[in-house]
Image (cartoon, rainbow, N blue to C red):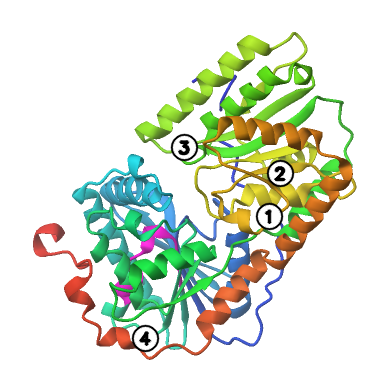
């Protein structure tokens, strides 16, 4: 891969905002797969708002340190009222459980890409080991009356593991990935011994009503106790993104072609090759746009899977082909950037772009689409082209919705976005901003925690015959050896 075409944007930096929680005395115990939660690594709006709540009410945040070390140490320090516990993974745990089962099995499965799902029982063993070890640490850190909030698909068995250790606290689990239909979940070997473990949680949060329906349909015949499933769409810090965009707009800039922009990981979920094909189709059909319109792709290299490498190679080849055919001395149709970029830089580019293009094959709430809308100039906003398979499609109704597999349809949507009259753009933008402000990141956090802190069902998990059905979490003697 030539660095002139592709080279990973820096983790975004979000402006701190005060927590909006009030009247809830419980401490929080947050568990996630994120790198060292108090070191500012891989921080996004949801990380910041959870930290705000922890800072206000006190508690513990346990997560992966980002380090791979066979000593498997936990590093503990305090940041105000927050006790930060960052655990190293052994090389085996990282290879099998994190880079294997979580990334190559569960991630594509939850995004509906059965063609990309790989399964290895050794990966499952590593995944179990990570959850088992994290459960030991969380159990030691939890106090009576705490609220335990577990995050994402890396830690699906953790709630049950905590119950096995006698933890009676209210336990919530939030899945940041989509939930595919039950028949897709059932395609996973051992599915019936993994996903039903969620019944040990009091509340399970998902992004959309469709996600909630799929999960309920899957669980209803497989669990003795149905957890409360809450729809809590994860928004962004709208005010912070808007402020950064206005700051960028105040700086002078040189004239440039009308810009279309995408911000994505180079993986099998992004739909990037199909998107570039749609842009090529647009240039073929509209010669007048040549020299006047350019596409900027901010790309972050994916993992080390064969599919990630294939997508990266295909994007490279398509970009070179399109540029080789249509470029002029003073104009390059496609620019792809994978150098590290600050969040403020990305917001500035989103503000500048006339069209935001977010066309994943399947996604959650598509924070890039939300950030694009929040970054726009209210007097002259751009237009958003959004995949109908994004969880954000139900809320951002002012976007031009497309089927990302339909190259001609996507090209037509790009054409419509570029030609959209100002008044229509303003109306669509205003509708989307109302949705963003209603369901921002603070509303997401408060809605979930209010549900978790409220009255819970009786602890029927004590009597449910889950151990017979569930994934055996405790390693046997051979595995410990």
What residue span does the magenta drawing correspond to?
Answer: 149-162
Mark 1 or mark 2: which comes first in sequence?
Answer: 2
Give the vertical position of 73 relative to 474 (above or below): above
State whether residue 339 appears in this view: no
Q: Is residue 464 above or below residue 133?
A: below
Q: CA distance from mark 2 to mark 4?
A: 46 Å
Give me the C-alpha separation between circle 3 and circle 1.
Answer: 24 Å
Which residue sits at x=34%, y=45%?
A: 114
Tag 3 secondary structure? loop
Q: Which tag is nearer the camera, tag 4 or tag 1? A: 1
Distance in Å between CA atoms under marks 4 and 1: 39 Å
Q: Which mark is residue 396?
A: 1
Camera-nearest label, 3 or 1: 1
Which tag is nearer the camera, tag 2 or tag 4?
2
Relative to 114, 288 lies left or right: right
Are the residues tagged 2 and 3 within 8 Å (C-beta)?
no
- Look at mark 4 in the image and give the residue it sits on: 168
Determine the residue positioned at 86% across, 40% down.
421
Q: Image quarter for residue 281? A: top right
Disc 2 to disc 4: CB gap under 8 Å: no
Q: Which residue is mark 3?
A: 267
**Pointer 3 or 4: first along the chain:** 4
Q: Residue at x 78, y 49 (%)?
A: 244
- Quarter residue 223 falls in: bottom left
Residue at disc 2, secondary structure: strand
Q: Tell me the distance, in whole angstroms, between the alpha carbons under discs 3 and 4.
A: 40 Å
* Residue 279 appears in the picture as rendered: yes
Left or right, 479 with reference to 44: left
Q: Residues within 10 Å of mark 4 (few under 14, many from 20)?
A: some
Q: Seen in the image, is 478 located left or right of residue 380? A: left
């Amino acid at each position: 891969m030539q660095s002139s075409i592709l080279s990973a944007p820096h983790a975004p930096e979000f402006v701190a905002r005060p927590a909006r929680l009030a009247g809830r005395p419980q401490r929080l115990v947050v568990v996630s797969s994120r790198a060292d939660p108090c070191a500012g690594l891989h921080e996004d709006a949801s990380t910041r708002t959870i930290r705000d709540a922890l800072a206000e009410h006190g508690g513990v945040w346990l997560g992966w340190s980002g380090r791979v070390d066979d000593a498997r140490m936990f590093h503990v320090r305090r940041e105000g009222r927050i006790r930060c516990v960052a655990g190293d993974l052994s090389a085996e745990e990282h290879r099998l459980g994190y880079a294997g089962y979580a990334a190559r099995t569960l991630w594509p499965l939850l995004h509906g890409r059965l063609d990309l799902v790989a399964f290895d029982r050794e990966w499952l063993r590593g995944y179990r080991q990570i959850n088992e070890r994290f459960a030991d640490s969380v159990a030691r850190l939890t106090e009576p009356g705490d609220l335990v909030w577990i995050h994402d698909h890396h830690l699906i068995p953790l709630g049950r593991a905590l119950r096995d250790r006698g933890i009676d606290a209210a336990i919530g689990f939030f899945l940041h990935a989509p939930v595919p239909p039950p028949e897709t979940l059932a395609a996973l070997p051992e599915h019936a011994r993994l996903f039903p473990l969620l019944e040990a949680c009091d509340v399970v949060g998902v992004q959309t009503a469709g996600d909630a329906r799929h999960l309920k349909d899957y669980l209803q015949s497989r669990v003795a106790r149905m957890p409360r499933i809450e729809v809590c769409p994860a928004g962004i810090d709208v005010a912070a993104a808007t402020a950064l965009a206005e700051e960028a707009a105040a700086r002078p800039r040189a004239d440039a072609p009308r810009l279309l922009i995408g911000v994505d990981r180079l993986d099998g979920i992004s739909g990037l090759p199909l998107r570039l094909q749609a842009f090529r189709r647009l240039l073929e059909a509209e010669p007048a746009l040549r020299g006047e319109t350019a596409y900027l792709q901010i790309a972050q290299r994916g993992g080390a899977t064969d599919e990630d490498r294939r997508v990266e190679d295909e994007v490279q080849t398509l970009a070179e082909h399109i540029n080789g055919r249509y470029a002029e001395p003073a104009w390059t149709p496609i620019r792809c950037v994978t150098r590290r970029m600050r969040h403020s830089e990305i917001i500035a580019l989103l503000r500048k772009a006339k069209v935001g293009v977010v066309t994943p094959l399947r996604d959650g709430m598509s924070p890039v689409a939300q950030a694009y809308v929040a970054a726009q100039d209210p007097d002259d906003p751009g237009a958003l082209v959004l995949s109908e398979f994004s969880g954000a499609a139900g809320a951002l109704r002012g976007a031009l919705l497309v089927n990302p597999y339909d190259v001609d349809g996507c090209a037509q949507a790009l054409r419509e976005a570029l030609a959209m009259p100002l008044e229509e753009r303003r109306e669509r933008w205003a509708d989307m901003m109302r949705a963003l402000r209603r369901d921002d990141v603070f509303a997401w956090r408060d809605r979930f925690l209010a549900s978790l802190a409220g009255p819970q069902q009786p602890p029927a998990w004590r009597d449910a015959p889950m151990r017979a059905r569930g994934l055996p979490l405790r390693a046997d003697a051979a595995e410990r050896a």
